[in-house]
């Protein structure tokens, strides 16, 4: 017998795999409405029946679900996407989707297409009835200048969009370059999506880490514990590379799943990355697992400077940090140029170990 999203959610609460949450419960009927419409109408837009309808069907409003970190937004979206019985659907991290769009636009331009957004949007809408984005965040001007026309064409084609974000629509691309050109996109989101704030006291990723050790040393002895934390936070996902556009290029988090990024110190700090790169990472992940932080000194001064910048970005964004290091924070950088300045970083590393820190 077919279960509603509310019944599926309640069954998981009963089984103990989810916790009771009135805020989550209140969102489920909205998602159920979308689910029913998609299941009843998706066949009319594809296959043999597509030619019978000259105009795209007009779906109900999609959903823009936003709120603080760890409130269960991604879980609700995944539950909805998995339970919606149609084939023409896709769930994707917003940054990964925009990376694909940029590549497709570049390929269209290489073919001499005058307005490449048109064929790119049309190709997406020809394949999908449901597009579910995780963690919409606009931090790159290239994205900001594209999303308005792209989404407008997707909406016109009848694509249902559901997205999660840590920010309300008005906070997207805040203080960005030429933001006035971005404002019509905010209006479009408001018109086409029902904006719902997921309010609630529970941060489920933080709950898993409550009272747990999150800083391990020496690093070589912590691999099993780090692997267990990754397994728990991601539900056993293998993880895929997350590539974030930053000023016309990309910065990569080697492994990413369920809002959790994972990388080694060398992968993020031995490369010539700057503040913009680390801000993009901090905006894209809710938890970062950083492994193999070495002893720091004048011999790896550049790497140490990047590490300081990374920690500052994570600290300001309230990203939960789990790491393995050569020693305790206060003994990571004992002498040489930069040792004095590192005291603030050591203090932040110590503060970020607090069980309730990311909630502050």
Image: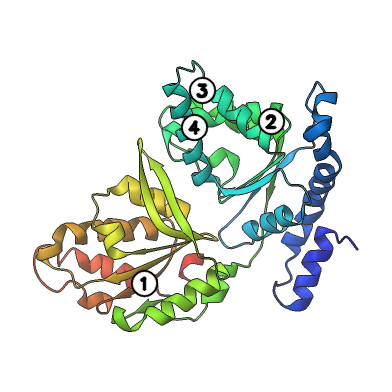
Q: Position of residue 200 (x, y in %)?
A: 66, 62
Q: What label does residue 116 carry, if any?
A: 3
Q: Are marks 2 and 3 in contact (CB under 8 Å)?
A: no
Task: Identify the residue under disc 4.
Answer: 104
- Find out whether the residues at labels 4 and 1 contact each other: C-beta distance under 8 Å: no
Q: Residue at x 71, y 53 (%)?
A: 81
From the top left corner, tell me how far across and down residue 126 is, in percent: 68, 32
Give the label, 2 or 3, closer to the camera. 3
Name the side, left or right, on which 263 lies relative to 203: left
Label at residue 323: 1
Disc 1 to disc 2, C-alpha distance: 42 Å
Which of the two labelled residues, at mark 4 and mark 2, occupies the earlier sequence position? 4
Residue at point 79% right, 51% down? Answer: 85
The Cα–Cα distance between marks 3 and 4, rounded to whole angstroms, is 8 Å
Q: CA distance from mark 4 to mark 1?
A: 36 Å
Mark 2 lies on residue = 155
Q: Earlier in the sequence, mark 1 or mark 2?
A: 2
């Amino acid at each position: 017998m077919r279960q509603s999203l509310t019944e599926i959610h309640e069954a998981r609460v009963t089984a103990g795999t989810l916790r009771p949450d009135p805020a989550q419960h209140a969102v489920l009927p909205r998602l159920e409405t979308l689910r029913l419409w998609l299941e009843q109408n998706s066949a009319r837009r594809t296959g043999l029946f597509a030619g019978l309808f000259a105009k795209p069907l007009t779906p109900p409003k999609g959903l823009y679900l936003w709120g603080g970190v760890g409130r269960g937004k991604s879980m609700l979206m995944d539950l909805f996407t998995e339970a919606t019985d149609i084939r023409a659907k896709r769930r994707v991290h917003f940054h990964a989707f925009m990376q694909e769009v940029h590549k497709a636009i570049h390929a269209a331009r290489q073919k001499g297409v005058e307005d490449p957004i048109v064929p790119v949007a049309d190709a997406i809408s020809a394949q999908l009835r449901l597009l579910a984005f995780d963690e919409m965040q606009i931090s790159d001007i290239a994205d900001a200048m594209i999303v308005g026309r792209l989404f407008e064409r997707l909406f016109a084609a009848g694509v249902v969009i559901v997205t999660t974000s840590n920010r309300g629509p008005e906070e997207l691309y805040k203080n960005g370059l030429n933001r006035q050109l971005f404002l019509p996109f905010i209006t479009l989101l408001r018109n086409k999506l029902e904006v719902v704030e997921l309010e609630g006291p529970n941060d489920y990723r933080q709950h898993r880490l409550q009272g747990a050790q999150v800083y391990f040393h020496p690093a070589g002895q912590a691999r099993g514990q780090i692997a267990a934390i990754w397994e728990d936070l991601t539900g056993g996902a293998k993880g895929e590379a997350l590539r974030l556009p930053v000023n016309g290029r990309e910065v990569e988090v080697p492994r990413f799943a369920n809002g959790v990024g994972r990388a080694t110190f060398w992968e993020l700090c031995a490369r010539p990355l700057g503040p913009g790169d680390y801000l993009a990472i901090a905006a894209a992940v809710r938890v970062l697992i950083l492994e193999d932080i070495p002893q720091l000194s004048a011999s790896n001064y550049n790497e140490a400077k990047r590490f300081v910048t990374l920690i500052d970005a994570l600290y300001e964004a309230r990203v939960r940090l789990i790491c393995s290091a050569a020693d305790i924070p206060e003994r990571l950088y004992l002498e040489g140029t930069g040792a004095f300045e590192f005291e603030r970083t050591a203090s932040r590393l110590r503060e970020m170990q607090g069980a309730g820190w990311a909630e502050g």
